[in-house]
Image (spheres, rainbow, N blue to C red):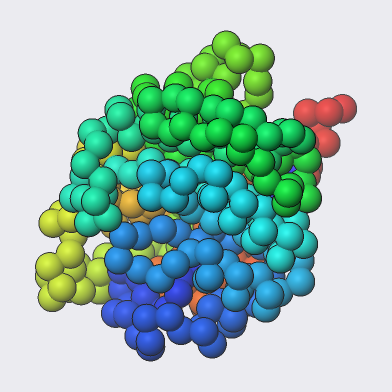
Amino acid sequence: MSVQFLGMIGHRLSSEIIPPAGPIFDRDYIVRFAQTHEAAGFDRLLVGHWSDQPDGFLVTALAGLSTQKINFLLAHRPGFVSPTLAARKFATLEHLLGGRLAVHIISGGNDAEQRRDGDYLDHDRRYARTEAFLEIVRQVWTQERPFDAHNDFYRVEQAFSAIKPLQQPHIPIFFGGSSDAAIAVAGKHANVFALWGESLAQTRETIQRVRAEAAKHQRQIDFSVSFRPIIAATETQAWEKAKEILHVATEHAAQTGAGHKNKPNSVGAQRLLQTVAQGDVVDKRLWTGIARLVGGGHNSTALVGTPEQVADALLDYYDLGVRNFLIRGFDPLNDAQEYGKELLPIARAKIAQRGAKQSA
């Protein structure tokens, strides 16, 4: 599989350093954002999920109909839509986009946020429900005849969908979660396992765990890692840029009460805090400043340096087996344009050279 670069689309302009601007569902921004990433050479766009934000299905539909080639990755939390209906919704959206859809299954890492939507299951039960959900979704996508299914969370009789995914055998499933319960589910169902940007040693360890779990089911899994690249013409300028981002983000967090206040209680957040504990800079250019500020709360580690230096850092993860890189900036729209001009061409060229050497 060739390397894939993913961006992350917002429904309005905002970041750790930019206060939310525009309407909550900013149609013009969504269209411009999607088209900018397509023009920059990104392969796919993640549409996230939050308990208080606009519906990701509709954000994806608008962005998808505004573009021609770029693929999409729709985040979805099991437990709020029945698996039979969810399977049909995914398949219908995939048809609308001409096959340009994957789904990112996230079981939820913040108890308080889950309860906003009425979900009171504990961590391990959420992952048990996710497994039950995916078992039925995959059957709906692939079964040519009505079927019955009964597990601890769902019971269906003569379930069937006339609309099937265009992609075969089904829509690709990305999966997030770092706990033992999460990895057990990923081993059975994930096509791509997604990690936040941890150290090389932590990433290697997780990849080994996931591969071992997948091997129990005679399966192979690809991997995705997420970073917030900070690039500039010189390394000194890049680190100055990072310093300014942290300064602005710290002031913004103080004004809004963000930061550690709402951090998740997920294993992924705990692991990111372990990365933070290794220092402000890990593995030469993995910067943990924002991750420390937000308490490990989300995709918040950065690779800092010139475009070539950051590309070399990505290559280190490529050597571990990573074939998907989700990169997004602190100035989302402008950074996407800059990545397309400065970072993606260099990274693709270096990875192509590495791939050629490995196959020689």
Which residue appears at 66% of the width and 24% of the height? 220
Quick one: quadrant of the N terminus? top right
The image quadrant that residue 69 belongs to is bottom right
Is 72 situated above or below 333? above
Residue placed at 32% from the left, 80% from the top?
20
Vertical relation: 124 (above or below) 223: above
Q: Which is more toward the observer, 2 or 109? A: 109
The picture places residue 162, in percent across and down from the top left corner, at: 73, 49
Residue 49 vertical placement versus 313 (above, below)? below
Quadrant of the rendered structure where residue 171 is? Answer: top right
Q: Residue furthest right?
A: 360
Residue 130 horizontal side relative to residue 139, left or right: left
- Is 149 in front, or is 109? 149
Q: Nearer the viewer, residue 327 or 187?
A: 187
Tell me which residue sits at (21%, 41%) in the image.
120
Residue 347 place in picture, x, y as percent: 67, 53
Residue 49: % across, % down:
41, 58
Judge from the rendering whether residue 222 lies leftward or rightward of residue 149; answer left or right.
right
Q: Which percent across, then down, holds residue 241?
A: 38, 69
